[in-house]
Amino acid sequence: MSGQDVNHTDDGGNRSRAVSPGAVAQAGKLGWLIDKGGIIFATGIFIAMLILIQEVFLRYVLNSPTIWAHETTIFLCAVAFIYGGLYCAARNTHIRVVILYDLVSPGVRRFLDVVISLVCMISAATFAWASWLMVERAAFAPDGSFRLETSGSAWNPPTPSLLKIFMLAVMVVLAIQFLVLAVNYARGVTHTNSSVQAEGDK
């Protein structure tokens, strides 16, 4: 898997693989910040749950539904979903097939880590460019003036444009994060996660 994997041996002598918490060392200070920022979006999902519970009570008990609950919960869950990709990249917990990866030597794995990170950086940069095209239409009028696209509902919040702007920001940071990973994999950085966290606390 990655430098974040930790091997454990149980009482029967069997070895198992577990993933330690936090960003991988190769993610650097940027990865440490991304990992710490995850709690913000996790809290957003919790708030979305509370809003939905309130909405059920208001709608079916008091017969007085709100016009903002559903769009707010969709927005909170959407930003958490978008951030999740960045969060997984910093922690190296994204899903990947490792059948061949586990068969090669550590040196080849290091080379593959660099190549994979560079390919992902290019991919993220491409998505950042595509996100910018969406932001141009969502945040600017044809005459170039700033105006945020709204949902068109009774509440009519600017959440569609805010989501597109947020995706652009995340894609840019994701591309930078993959570049940091590629550089540190190439340098052979293998410090433990605890050391990265300690540096981030300084």
Image (cartoon, rainbow, N blue to C red):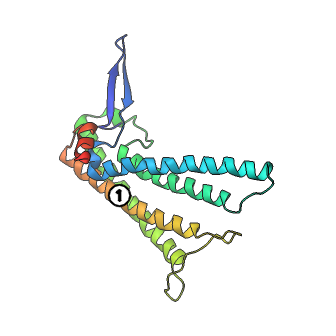
Tell me the quarter of the image containing the N terminus: top left
Q: Nearer the viewer, residue 93 or 100?
A: 93
- Residue 136, percent across and down? 49, 77
Name the residue: 66% across, 50% down.
52
- Residue 122, percent across and down? 36, 60
Disc 1 is placed on an element classified as helix
Q: Is residue 185 visible?
A: no
Is residue 24 depicted above or below 140 in this figure? above
Residue 142 sits in quarter? bottom right
Q: Nearer the viewer, residue 66 or 115?
A: 66
Horizontal relation, residue 131 to residue 65: left or right: left
Name the residue: 70% across, 52% down.
55
- Residue 137, percent across and down? 53, 77
Most distant residue in the front direction = 62
Residue 126 sits in quarter? bottom left
- Residue 28, percent across and down? 26, 49
Horizontal relation, residue 60 to residue 147: left or right: right
Most distant residue in the left direction = 187
Is residue 65 depicted above or below 4 in this figure? below
Which residue is labeled 1 in the image?
121
Name the residue: 51% across, 52% down.
80
**Amino acid under disc 1:** Met
Q: Is residue 157 visible?
A: yes
Most distant residue in the top direction = 12
Tag count: 1
